[in-house]
Each structure stands twice: as C-alpha cells, then as structure tokens.
Image (spheres, rainbow, N blue to C red):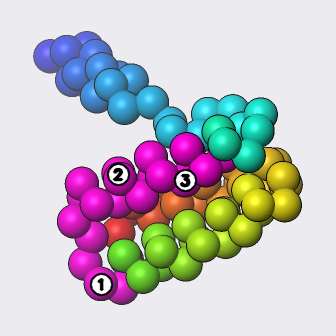
Amino acid sequence: MLKHLAAAALAIACARPSLAAEVPPSVDECFKVALDLADAADERQLADPARSKVDDLLSTMEGYCEVSDFTQAKTISGDIEAAIERP
C-alpha cells in the first residue's frame, strides 16, 4: 500500500515539470518562461495577496529578462513557482 502511495506521489510530481528548469538562453525564451508562469498563475486562480506577490515577482523577472540577466530571472522564476504552488 505504501509503495502505491509513493508511486502515485512521484507520478504527480513528475506530471508537472518545472517551467524554469534551466537558465533561459535568450531574451525571447526568458519572456516565454515568464508568460508560461503567468498562465500557470491564472490557472490556479490565486487569491489577491498571492496573486499580487506573483505579479510583483513577474515584473522583477521581466526586468531581468530585459537586461539579459538570465541567471537572476531563473532564480525569480523559482520564487514564482513556489508562490503559485503554495499561495
């Protein structure tokens, strides 16, 4: 029984891979990741405090995308994913 629960938990975790698993290689890819994260937040229909936090983080990420600081953009994308998953 425990093995089945562990297998189910692993399947769920693997079903939704991280949107920002790697550092984006270009400005366009960076903005695509930001857009995908915004779409994921929309799908979750976050309440106002959580949505405001995600919007602020998205603005920060887009700023890093604009100046081609993709490492910082990836770091912020992880924060965005965490905010979406745990509102």
- The answer to whether residue 52 is magenta is no
Kindly identify which residue carries mark 3. Answer: 34
Which residue is pictured at 44% across the width and 46% down the height?
Answer: 36
> Is 27 placed left or right of 53 in the picture?
right
**Compared with residue 18, is residue 66 higher up or lower down, i.e. above or below?**
below
Residue 12, percent across and down? Answer: 28, 28
Kind of residue at disc 3: Ala
Which residue is pictured at 39% across the width and 24% down the height?
Answer: 14
Label 3: which secondary element: helix
Closer to the camera: disc 2 or disc 3? 3
Kind of residue at disc 2: Ala
> Is 25 placed left or right of 13 in the picture?
right
Range of residues picked out in magenta: 30-50
Label 1: which secondary element: helix
Kindly identify which residue carries mark 2. Answer: 40
**Compared with residue 20, is residue 3 higher up or lower down, i.e. above or below?**
above
Choose the circle earlier in sequence order: 1 or 2: 2
**Real-space Cα separation, disc 2 to disc 3, in angstroms:** 10 Å
